[in-house]
Image (cartoon, coloured by chain):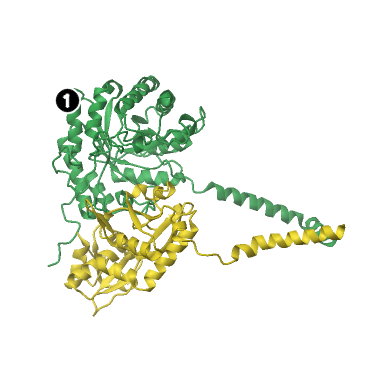
Chain colours: A yellow, B green
């Protein structure tokens, strides 16, 4: 009787081990698009008040994030539907099941980590140092003794003030607009400009100017998914990686910036 | 097992004094860790300013550390603002019926008084016990009006002399702010009526202010809200005039400069004049008005934002314009001085000081204006040619 009880106990323990460690790790079929997006469409929350990322006209939406949403939906194999709202409603739209994901110039917010999962980033909008090809200034430490142009009152202004306390003096040249700061470098009034990557790319494209861009700060834009949808997060993250690797993401960015 | 026990017992017997000292040291260190930085009151401060209508909207109620409240209010005072608007949620203070936790409000009022600042209090947010299940914090059912009135009266009595104006609710012309229900000017008028007498009985000197209405063009019947001009008219028609002593206004410049002319179908800074005209039409223009939210945003991409340099210029021009042209205006309060935490989006570009206490150039520009130190020299270089 005791031997039988021992065998039952051992079998029970083996069962527990199988249930806890082996079964969950068995390969499972990838969820279908319909399982990932139960409404039969990819409902993408956007804030169409941020050109060139998302803009609304009376009957249309366009911009980098609109194209990205379409490319992701196409890759996964489900039609997209864009839900336009203000920033205040973006995260709540996930909680209220009004959207499946958010693509809206979001920055990773640790205070939201209990509610959402963030994918890898699709764009880095941080500050860059822009310098001419014949006199490259690749990092802030190299500014000592040079002149730096930036937009007055911007994040670049704040960062320049901080760096003034860290390294040997450099000349600060505040301008009213980021385009003027970039003009100053292009026309030889300043050695480098500190602007965000979006302003820099738009300026370089407009002026057909081959300047050097070096990242100073990171401001990554990821996609947000409800925390209770890890499979959806995984599928979107993989899709974003694939779009990055096959060059689609760069094409979209180049189209708008 | 027995051997291990013996070893432990022997060690304790031999070194018990050291174990005791270690225990006491651990206890003292754990107490120190829990205390955190202190925020003792400084000697009584006085605001230095040439423009006493300068005011800012703070967001201090969610601040965890008292020293951050103190530092924020020091910066407000040093900038030259005389007043703050601060939110005191009912749900935070009376989370359980008849049980009040005044400490979060006390420490704000204490430090504001210490810095020589006056406080305009905004009241709202309904505790669970006073609203229906599955409702939002902004849904105040009519049967809870008296409970809310009692809370406001208790608040007014507690902070008599420190809080001279109390704003009843926030933007009730938005469905979101009215508990996702159809907005109801007559219902809001009844709320003002319920509050008015108990609060004045508790503190005769305090002024009841109509809530700042959201600047919006939503037409009648919209599920989202109602045009602020229409809402104010309906409020008067509902007989609310007898139940408030002043008017709070929300007016934003968006992309227009402050001098841009107002129009009924335009949202800009001088929309305040259209609201004032309604008070005149109803014979109520002797009551003071307080702009409790205004300002410009300098986010680099948001379509309703301006550039940082424009934001500074427009803000200073708004102060000058209001002082020169609006004798009926008591305070002009900028949204927002500093948030407790960043939003990581365009709302952060309304701040004057960041949540991490980084002071933006607009702060120094307002300070120079407040102290009469404006030199007239440009803050930025001319465009390169």
Question: In which quadrant will I find the N terminus of chain A?
Answer: bottom right
**Residue B218 x %, y %:** 25, 38
**Residue B367 x %, y %:** 26, 47
State which chain disc 1 sits on.
B
Against A159, residue B163 (above or below) is above
Question: In which quadrant will I find the C terminus of chain A?
Answer: bottom left
**Residue B6 x %, y %:** 84, 59
The extreme bottom residue here reads: A134
Label 1 sits on a secondary structure element that is: helix
User: Which residue is more in the foreground, B85 or B25?
Assistant: B85
Left or right of B263, for residue A128: right
Q: Which residue is mark 1?
A: B281
Q: Residue B158 sits in which quadrant?
A: top left
Give the residue at x 17% y 44%.
Answer: B258
Left or right of B136, for residue A61: left
The extreme right residue here reads: A1
For disc 1, the neighbor class at 10 Å (few under 14, some 14 to 19, many from 20) is few
Against A241, residue A158 (above or below) is above
Q: From where the camera sits, is residue B356 visible?
A: yes
User: Which residue is more in the foreground, A72 or B102?
Assistant: A72
Q: Residue B265 sits in which quadrant?
A: top left
Q: Residue A214 sits in which quadrant?
A: bottom left
User: Which residue is more in the foreground, B325 or B195?
Assistant: B195
**Residue B363 x %, y %:** 28, 50
Q: From where the camera sits, is residue A169 visible?
A: no
Left or right of A104, for residue B262: left
User: Which residue is more in the foreground, A103 or A167?
Assistant: A103
Against A242, residue B76 (above or below) is above
Give the residue at x 29% y 62%.
Answer: A64
């Amino acid at each position: 009787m005791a031997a039988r009880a021992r065998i039952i106990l051992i079998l029970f323990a083996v069962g527990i081990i199988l249930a806890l460690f082996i079964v969950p790790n068995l390969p499972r079929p990838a969820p279908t698009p319909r399982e990932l997006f139960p409404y039969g469409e990819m409902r993408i929350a956007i804030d169409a008040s941020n050109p060139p990322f998302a803009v609304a006209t009376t009957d249309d939406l366009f911009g980098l994030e609109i194209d990205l949403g379409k490319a992701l939906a196409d890759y996964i194999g489900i039609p997209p539907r864009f839900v336009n709202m203000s920033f205040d409603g973006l995260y709540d739209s996930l909680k209220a099941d009004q959207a499946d994901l958010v693509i809206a110039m979001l920055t990773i917010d640790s205070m939201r980590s209990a509610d959402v999962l963030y994918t890898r980033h699709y764009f880095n909008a941080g500050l860059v140092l822009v310098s001419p090809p014949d006199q490259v200034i690749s990092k802030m430490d190299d500014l000592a003794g040079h002149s730096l142009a930036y937009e007055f009152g911007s994040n670049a202004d704040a960062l320049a003030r901080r760096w003034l306390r860290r390294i040997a003096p450099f000349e600060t040249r505040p301008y009213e607009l980021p385009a003027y700061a970039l003009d100053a470098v292009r026309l030889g009034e300043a050695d480098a400009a500190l602007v965000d990557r979006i302003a820099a790319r738009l300026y370089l494209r407009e002026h057909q100017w081959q300047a050097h861009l070096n990242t100073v700060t990171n401001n990554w834009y990821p996609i947000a998914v409800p925390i209770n949808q890890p499979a959806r997060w995984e599928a979107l993250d993989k899709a974003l990686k694939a779009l990055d690797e096959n060059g689609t993401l760069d094409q979209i960015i180049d189209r708008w910036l | 097992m027995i051997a291990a026990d013996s070893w432990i017992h022997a060690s304790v017997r031999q070194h018990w004094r050291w174990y005791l000292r270690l225990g006491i040291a651990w206890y003292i260190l754990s107490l120190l860790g829990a205390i955190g930085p202190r925020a003792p009151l400084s000697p009584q401060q006085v605001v230095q300013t040439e423009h006493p209508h300068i005011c800012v909207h703070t967001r201090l109620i969610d601040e965890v550390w008292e020293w951050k409240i103190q530092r924020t209010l020091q910066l407000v005072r040093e900038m030259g603002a005389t007043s703050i608007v601060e939110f005191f949620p009912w749900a935070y203070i009376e989370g359980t019926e008849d049980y009040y936790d005044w400490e979060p409000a006390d420490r704000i009022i204490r430090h504001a008084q210490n810095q020589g600042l006056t406080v305009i209090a905004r009241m709202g947010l309904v505790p669970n016990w006073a609203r229906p299940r599955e409702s939002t914090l902004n849904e105040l059912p009519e049967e809870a009006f008296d409970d809310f009135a009692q809370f406001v009266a208790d608040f007014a009595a507690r902070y008599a002399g420190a809080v001279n104006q109390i704003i009843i609710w926030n933007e009730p012309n938005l469905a979101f702010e009215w508990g996702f229900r159809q907005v109801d000017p007559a219902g809001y008028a009844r709320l003002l009526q319920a509050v008015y007498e108990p609060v004045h009985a508790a503190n005769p000197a305090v002024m009841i202010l109509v809530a700042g209405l959201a600047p919006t063009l939503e037409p009648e019947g919209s599920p989202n809200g109602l045009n602020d001009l229409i809402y104010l008219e309906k409020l008067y028609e509902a007989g609310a005039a007898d139940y408030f002593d002043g008017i709070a206004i929300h007016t934003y410049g968006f992309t227009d400069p402050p001098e841009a002319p107002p129009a009924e179908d335009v949202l800009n800074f001088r929309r305040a004049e259209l609201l004032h005209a309604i008070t005149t039409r109803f014979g109520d223009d002797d009551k003071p008005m307080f702009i409790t939210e205004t300002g410009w945003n300098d986010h680099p991409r948001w379509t309703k934002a301006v550039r940082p340099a424009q934001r500074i210029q427009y803000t200073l021009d708004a102060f000058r314009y209001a002082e020169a042209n609006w004798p009926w205006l008591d305070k002009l309060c900028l949204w927002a001085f500093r948030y407790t935490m960043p939003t990581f989006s365009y709302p952060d570009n309304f701040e004057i000081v960041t949540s991490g206490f980084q002071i933006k150039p607009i702060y120094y520009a307002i300070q120079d204006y407040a102290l009469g130190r404006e030199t007239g020299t440009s803050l930025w270089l001319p465009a390169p040619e």
